[in-house]
Image (cartoon, rainbow, N blue to C red):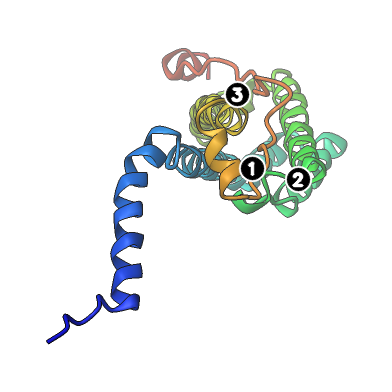
Amino acid sequence: MLAQPFPLPAFRHFWTMAIFAIMLPVLAGCGFNTIPTAEEQAKAAWSEVLNQYQRRADLIPNLVETVKGYAAHEREVLQSVVEARAKATQTTLSPEALEDPAAFKAFQESQAGLTGALSRLLAVVENYPDLKANQNFLALQAQLEGTENRIAVARRDYIEAVRVYNTSLRTFPSLLWANFWFTDNEPFQNFTVAEDKIEVPNVNFGTQQQGG
């Protein structure tokens, strides 16, 4: 009795699995996971940047109202902050759009505009001792200072994450994965200015209370 030939579909399946088992360590060694991992880390870092900028935006309405109570005639400065905040909150950039140079530039410029407006507002506040001694203003000032520090940290983390991701797209061996699998990964945009931070005056509650 003749032996049954090895079924062709099963034969193909066997060799497919065998080739995959052989290639898996090779793919891992040539950066199979490097690019996707770096991409996700960069996107996560960007989400934290957005969170901290939103945290700053959320503080502004109370800050403006508090300043207005002592310096209502500083309409131009107050209005510029309100308008800059509106522009910054309307100019959004999702992690999926980090490859777009124009969108990233617009986002960066809108946030820089808000930074400048807030800096001018805080400079004006220096002319109002009673406002500087106000407990609500002191609390907001402290929160703003903390938020600016968080923004700086989030930006630095994003800059580094993008450096790692963009490097993985153009260096051996991870670039083999991108070329072999014909991925459409493009470099992410990065901040052109490493720091964009408001210089918030130091808050000293004890000194302010004694002065008031």
Instruction: Give the mark nearest the N terminus, 2 or 3.
Output: 2
Residue 26: numbered disc:
none
Residue 71 position by quadrant: top right
Q: Position of residue 177 (x, y in %)?
A: 52, 41
Label 2–label 3 contact, CB within 8 A: no
Horizontal side, residue 40 vs residue 124: left or right: left
Is disc 2 surrounded by few (<14), some (14 to 19) or many (20+) residues within 10 Å? Answer: some
Q: Which residue is mark 1?
A: 60
Cα distance, mark 2 to mark 1? 28 Å
Q: Position of residue 127 (x, y in %)?
A: 73, 19
Q: Nearer the viewer, residue 84 or 10?
A: 10
Cα distance, mark 2 to mark 3? 42 Å
* Helix, strand or loop at mark 2: loop
Label 3–label 1 contact, CB within 8 A: no
Picture residue at 52% right of the left edge, 14% below the top: 211
Horizontal side, residue 48 vs residue 27: left or right: right
* Helix, strand or loop at mark 1: helix
Query: Which of the two discs, 3 and 1, sits closer to the camera?
Result: 1
Q: Position of residue 178 (x, y in %)?
A: 58, 42
Picture residue at 74% right of the left edge, 24% below the top: 192
Specify the amino acid type for callout 3: Lys
Residue 142 seen in render: no
